[in-house]
């Protein structure tokens, strides 16, 4: 039996199947061959849609062509630490913080916050009010040497010596005058005596003298004024402990 020639199309080209003589038992094989050969070729041959994109293939080829000159290697712990330091050079090492004592770490001192405009205006207003309310001027306290000299003289006023013989003369002072002179004497003794806790402290010595007399701070101010006047002039001895009479 003669098998007719047939043309088979495939992706690899078109080619005829040559006619050949075959016995009767091979006729069925030839027919099956003619029918299934194109089907198998079309089934297992790669289609155009499944072929890779030439642009992508070319791009991948260019990437594979530009290989790194350094061989690939696994990163170790040291390499990771070095890479982290390069990325974050000012980062704090946690290992050093754990090993260091917390007391040895010097933290920066926080700066106080800047005052606001309202606070600056309030401070300026307070200074202006304080300057307007200060009508007087600051008076310097007398020196300790001048106070000690006045203390000796005022002691002579309380106990004037006799011209002849030991002892002293009774000055015959009224109670108000004696109390005034004794208050000034106590004040100057507390101010000029090195053994006194108020030595060299003008205001504190006057307050202590007023308290020993059973008086208040107003009496301390009067004692400061009278003692200052007596130090400047020994003849000034007001008659009233609380000031001059009207």
Image (cartoon, helix red, strand yellow):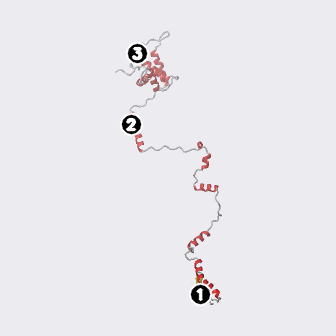
Q: Secondary structure at mark 2?
A: helix
Which residue is label 3 attached to?
175
Q: Nearer the viewer, mark 1 or mark 3?
A: 1
Work out which residue is located at the far top of the displayed protein and give it.
165
The image quadrant of residue 78 is bottom right
Give me the residue at 45% from left, 24% from top: 207
Measure how far apart labels 2 and 1 are at the Cα level.
Answer: 123 Å
The image quadrant of residue 220 is top left
Which residue is label 2 attached to?
129
Q: Secondary structure at mark 1?
A: strand
Nearest the eye: 35 or 232: 35
Give me the residue at 39% from left, 39% from top: 125
Which residue is label 1 attached to?
6
- Is residue 64 positioned above or below 101 on the image? below
The image shows residue 26 at horizontal and vertical percentages of: 64, 86
Q: Quadrant of the C terminus?
A: top left
Measure how far apart labels 1 and 3 are at the Cα level.
Answer: 161 Å
């Amino acid at each position: 039996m003669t098998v007719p020639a047939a043309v088979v199309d495939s992706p690899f080209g078109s080619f005829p199947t040559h006619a050949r003589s075959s016995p009767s038992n091979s006729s069925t094989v030839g027919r099956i061959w003619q029918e299934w050969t194109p089907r198998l070729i079309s089934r297992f041959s790669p289609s155009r849609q499944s072929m890779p994109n030439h642009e992508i293939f070319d791009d991948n080829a260019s990437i594979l062509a530009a290989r790194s000159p350094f061989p690939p290697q696994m990163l170790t712990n040291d390499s990771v630490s070095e890479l982290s330091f390069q990325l974050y050079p000012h980062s704090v090492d946690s290992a050093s913080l754990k090993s260091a004592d917390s007391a040895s770490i010097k933290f920066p001192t926080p700066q106080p916050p800047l005052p606001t405009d309202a606070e600056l205006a309030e401070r300026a207003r307070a200074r202006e009010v304080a300057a307007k309310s200060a009508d007087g001027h600051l008076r310097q306290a007398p020196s300790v040497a001048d106070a000690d000299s006045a203390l000796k003289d005022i002691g002579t006023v309380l106990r004037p010596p006799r011209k002849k013989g030991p002892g002293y003369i009774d000055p015959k002072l009224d109670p108000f005058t004696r109390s005034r002179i004794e208050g000034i004497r106590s004040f100057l003794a507390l101010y000029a005596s090195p053994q006194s806790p108020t030595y060299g402290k003008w205001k504190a010595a006057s307050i202590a003298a007023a308290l020993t007399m059973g008086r208040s701070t107003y009496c301390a101010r009067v004692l400061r004024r009278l003692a200052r006047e007596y130090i400047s002039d020994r003849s000034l001895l007001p008659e009233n402990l609380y000031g001059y009479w009207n």
